[in-house]
Image: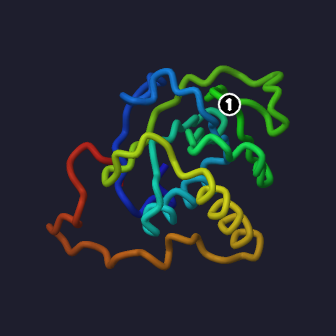
């Protein structure tokens, strides 16, 4: 699960949304987990608003609530959906026919941010950049931000018990 996440995430088990997102009526972007994790990592390093993301291990997808709620017209980059008020996993065409239930879903919350939603315009731009870099055989965008590894016995800045790093 941590192949591209260089920054720690708080993990909230279960599908119950974090406080503040209960009853959220805005748009939700669904994207392949590896691409979306790289995009969110790049956004966090770049100082963009990044909120919680719902991870589905069964379908290898990330569901990202976005704002402002005017981003749906810009979607989708390939293999990405933007739908109002839905964190249900579905196929790339959005119909979800034949999709199995999602028993292994949980929320990731960036530790440095109290944002309720992710900046939709920035997510669109960064997802397109990440996808282009992958098609051209480039490294993940977060690679240019990586810090030196911690020495033996040293705790990296910002890492605390219970956080996924």
As drawn, the residue found furthest toward the left would be 153
Q: Nearer the viewer, residue 69 or 124?
A: 69
The residue sitting at 51% across, 48% down in the picture is 118
In the image, residue 3 lies at what x, y percent? 50, 58
Rendered position, 57 above or below 149: above
Classed neighbour count for the residue bearing mark 1: other residues with Cα under 10 Å, few (<14), some (14–19), many (≥20): some
The residue sitting at 77% across, 46% down in the picture is 73
Quarter of the picture holding the C terminus = bottom left
Quarter of the image for residue 155 reads: bottom left
In the image, residue 29 lies at what x, y percent? 65, 42
Rendered position, 98 above or below 94: above
Would you name the residue on which mark 1 appears? 84
Rendered position, 13 above or below 145: above
Q: Nearer the viewer, residue 71 or 30?
A: 71
In the image, residue 48 lies at what x, y percent? 47, 61
Rendered position, 103 above or below 122: above
Please state if 144 lies on the left or on the right of 71 as rendered: left
Q: How is the image coloured?
A: rainbow
Q: Nearer the viewer, residue 160 or 39?
A: 39
Please state if 18 lies on the left or on the right of 150 as rendered: right
Q: How many marks?
A: 1
In the image, residue 108 lies at what x, y percent? 43, 42
Q: Secondary structure at mark 1?
A: strand
Please state if 153 lies on the left or on the right of 90 as rendered: left
The residue sitting at 38% across, 49% down in the picture is 110
Quarter of the image for residue 130 reads: bottom right
The residue sitting at 53% across, 38% down in the picture is 55
């Amino acid at each position: 699960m941590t192949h591209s996440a260089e920054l720690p995430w708080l993990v909230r088990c279960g599908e119950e949304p974090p406080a503040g997102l209960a009853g959220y009526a805005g748009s939700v972007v669904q994207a392949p987990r590896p691409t979306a994790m790289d995009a969110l990592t790049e956004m966090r390093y770049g100082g963009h608003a990044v909120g919680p993301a719902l991870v589905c291990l069964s379908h290898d997808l990330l569901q990202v609530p976005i704002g402002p709620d005017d981003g749906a017209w810009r979607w989708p980059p390939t293999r990405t959906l933007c739908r109002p008020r839905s964190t249900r996993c579905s196929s790339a065409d959005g119909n979800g026919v034949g999709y199995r239930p999602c028993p292994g879903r949980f929320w990731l919350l960036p530790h440095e941010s109290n944002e309720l939603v992710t900046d939709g315009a920035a997510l669109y731009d960064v997802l397109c950049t990440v996808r282009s870099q992958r098609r051209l055989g480039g490294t993940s965008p977060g690679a240019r931000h990586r810090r030196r590894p911690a020495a033996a016995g040293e705790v990296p800045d910002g890492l605390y018990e219970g956080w996924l790093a």
